[in-house]
């Protein structure tokens, strides 16, 4: 018996298309990306001994609906450049097709005034080796050794980005999983999340870029890009 298909009425079709256009997609590696073996949602790039991988479809923490509100990106950085490298939020960007730039929201306030818990500290639950937290966050991350010198501080950027958080975010778990600012020594590695402004609602393609400088003030070490599609 033949199947009968009932096309949507014009108004119903328009509503369905509008809803589809407003939904979030999955952030997956583009065809030209270097996909990580065994992890089809993650892609990587390498330059001058610095390797970085990124996965935009990995969030399993709380809140569960975070990918419908923001763009959490899990990153892993491995440093074999022979130099320490700075990990600063302003150096990471997601860029859309038309050039719009989305930047990470700091998981903890730079002024340390918003309470974090009873002791005012964060106990990280990410993997790291030979990572040193920025001095300005040493009191928040007491389990991480501080870097020996102050890092460049764009307080205006940090304060502006922190104000972009919704009232109920970041959660405690997000703070513990978030990648802190600091320095990754030669031979070190770290993994954690960068929480970007909502990008997958608006873009069909995104490029993740990282510009990593020498932690001792010696200039650029690596500039890496990873292309993604949203579907």
Image: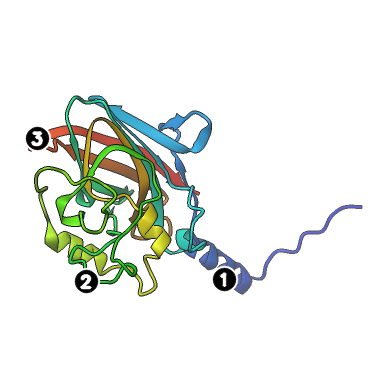
Mark 1, Cα crowd under 10 Å, few <14 / some 14-19 / many 20+, is few
Q: Do the residues labelled 2 and 3 touch (CB within 8 Å)?
A: no
Above or below, comparing residue 114 to residue 27 in the picture? below
Please tell me whether mark 2 sits on a helix, a strand or a loop: loop
Q: What x and y, as percent, mark residue 136?
A: 16, 56
Along the line of sight, which residue is nearer the eye, 36 or 15?
A: 36
Question: Can you identify the residue that label 1 sits on?
Answer: 15
Q: Which residue is drawn at the image coordinates 9% and 35% (left, top)?
A: 219
Please tell me whether mark 3 sits on a helix, a strand or a loop: loop
What distance separates the C-alpha of mark 2 from that of mark 1?
A: 45 Å
Q: What x and y, as percent, mark residue 71?
A: 40, 56
Mark 3, Cα crowd under 10 Å, few <14 / some 14-19 / many 20+, is few
Question: Can you identify the residue that label 2 sits on?
Answer: 113
Foreground mark, 1 or 3? 3
Along the line of sight, which residue is nearer the eye, 26 or 63?
A: 63
- The first of marks 2 and 1 along the sequence is 1
Foreground mark, 2 or 1? 2
**Residue 164, quarter of picture:** bottom left
Q: Which residue is drawn at the image coordinates 7% and 38% (left, top)?
A: 217
Please tell me whether mark 1 sits on a helix, a strand or a loop: helix
Q: What x and y, as percent, mark residue 73?
A: 39, 49
Q: In this view, does 40 lie to the left or right of 171?
A: right
Q: Which residue is drawn at the image coordinates 57% and 71% (left, top)?
A: 15
Mark 2, Cα crowd under 10 Å, few <14 / some 14-19 / many 20+, is few
Determine if residue 231 is in view.
Answer: yes
**Residue 183, quarter of picture:** top left
What distance separates the C-alpha of mark 1 from that of mark 3?
A: 52 Å
Question: Can you identify the residue that label 3 sits on?
Answer: 219
């Amino acid at each position: 018996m033949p199947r009968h298909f009932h096309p949507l009425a014009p108004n119903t079709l328009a509503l369905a298309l509008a809803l589809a256009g407003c939904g979030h997609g999955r952030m997956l590696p583009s065809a030209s990306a270097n996909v990580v073996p065994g992890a089809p949602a993650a892609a990587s790039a390498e330059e001058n001994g610095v390797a970085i991988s990124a996965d935009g479809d990995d969030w399993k923490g709380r809140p569960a609906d975070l990918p419908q509100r923001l763009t959490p990106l899990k990153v892993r950085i491995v440093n074999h450049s022979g130099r320490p490298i700075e990990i600063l939020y302003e150096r990471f960007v997601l860029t859309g097709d038309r050039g719009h730039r989305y930047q990470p929201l700091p998981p903890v306030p730079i002024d340390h005034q918003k309470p974090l818990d009873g002791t005012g500290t964060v106990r990280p639950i990410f993997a790291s080796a030979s990572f040193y937290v920025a001095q300005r966050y040493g009191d928040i991350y007491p389990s991480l050794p501080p870097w020996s010198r102050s890092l460049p501080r764009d307080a205006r950027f940090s304060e502006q980005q922190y104000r972009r958080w919704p009232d109920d975010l970041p959660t405690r778990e997000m703070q513990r999983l978030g990648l802190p600012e600091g320095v990754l020594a030669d031979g070190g590695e770290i993994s954690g999340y960068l929480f970007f402004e909502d990008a997958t609602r608006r873009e069909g393609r995104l490029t993740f870029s990282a510009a990593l400088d020498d932690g001792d003030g010696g200039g650029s070490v690596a500039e890496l890009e990873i292309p993604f599609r949203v579907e």
